[in-house]
Amino acid sequence: MLSLTNIGFVRWSVTPLIVAGSRLLHTTSLDLAARKGTREKARKAKVKKVVEKVEFIRHDLRKKGKLNLVVANKHIDDSWKQDPKDDCWVSRYYKWRVYSVEEAIHCHRETHHPTVYNLPNSPLFAHVELNMQAEKVTRFVDNFQRMVAIPHRFDHGENRNIIVFAKGQEPLKEATDAGATLVGGVELIKEIQNGDLQLAEYPFVLAHPNILPELVVIRGLLKKNRFPNPRSGTLGVNLAEMIEKYAHGINYSATKDEQQKDFGSIVACIGMLPMDAKHLESNLVSLLQDVNSMRPKREGKFVTRVLLKCPPSGENLKIDPFVYIPAEGVFSKKSAKSESNAEEDDTEEHEEPKAAVAGGAS
């Protein structure tokens, strides 16, 4: 007979063998893995997502911590330097020499002579530097592109194809005689709608006001700022003058610097070196007067510096633009109102003592 202790020993020794022999029925490790996953999910559910509120940051501190590039001021002011006293001087320590337009043209002709660069028919460029600050200190003049009529023609080397829309025999004949590339009316608009004519071949689109209602149909086919309007000078009654301006004028654009927003520049060709110096000067004056018409209503200079360049030469010859345009701008509206209020106060102060004297005399 087996005692109780022997029976218990047998049960204890047999049970592991049965379990060991049937591994497929053993689920202890799987249970532990499941519990571990559920515990992690429970812990994640208990954690609250805290949304941090960002406080207001001043505009001058928003770029703090980013890479700050040290940008030199592009407005060059050498008025504090002394004038050179000799024919040879170090330009770093003295003012730039200011040339007349004729002197600058003569200097460029010397460098482009057949014995030097051998490019006597090179174009002459005017580099105009601008102060793009608007009426407010934090505002700046937007980039603008304009076409200016010049008194003396020259070969621009650009695509100046002009398409003109008008109704009536007289406007169409006027546009044809003025030298427009393509002239038409309602039939021409239908050709553009059907896709028989591509407007991309014509960079300038002009129109007479009498065809404006029919022209609205192709407004979507025209790119931005190409639809005729009176502000840009592409919509008007005098078609001959408009065609002359866009066929032979100077096309220029003023762009702001990316880092220094108050600095703008214009690069425009004013003619060819073989042209008469007086003719080149007249073209330059027309350009400067048109640029000056975009001056903001504030004090100070708008055109800061003008250089005449003629590649491939690296000479930058400075001229005085304020011989042709005013240097300082007009007062802004606010300053004008404040001045008028100050004048009124002064007149009232002068009138009060007069009234007091009159009362004492009586």
Image: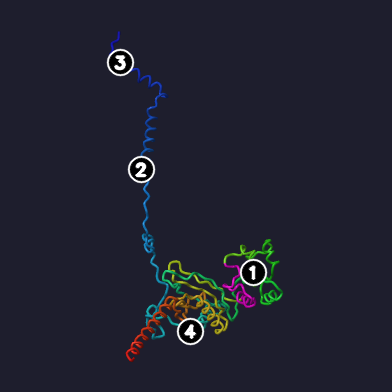
Camera-side residue of 307 and 324 = 324
Eye-nearest disc, 3 or 2 = 2
Residue 323 numbered tag? 4
- Please tell me how crowded label 1 is: few (under 14), some (14-19), or many (20+) other residues with Cα within 10 Å: some
Question: Which residue carries the number 2 mark?
Answer: 47
Q: What residue type is labelled 2?
A: Val
Q: Single out the mark in the foreground, 2 or 1.
A: 1
Instruction: For mark 4, give the secondary structure.
Output: helix
Does the segment drawn in magenta span residue 240?
yes
- The residue labelled by disc 1 is 212
* CB contact under 8 Å: marks 2 and 1: no
Q: Dot 3: within a 10 Å radius of its alpha carbon, few (fewer than 14), some, or many (20 or more) residues?
A: few
Cα gap from disc 3 to disc 4, whole angstroms: 122 Å
Tag 4: amino acid: Val
Q: Where is residue 260 in the image (x, y as percent from the top left)?
A: 43, 69
Q: Which residue is at the front of the view, 86 or 290?
A: 290
Is the residue under label 1 in contact with that under label 3 (CB below 8 Å)?
no
Distance, label 3 to label 2, CA atoms, is 50 Å
Residue at 60% over, 68% down: 227
Q: In this view, does 113 lie to the left or right of 1?
A: right
The 10 Å Cα crowd at callout 2, few under 14, some 14 to 19, many 20 or more, is few
- Residue range highlighted in magenta: 225-247
Task: Label 2, secondary structure: give it.
Answer: loop
Q: Which mark is residue 8?
A: 3
Q: Residue at x 36, y 44 (%)?
A: 48
First in sequence: mark 1 vs mark 4: 1
In the image, what residue occupies the spot 63% across and 68% down? Answer: 202
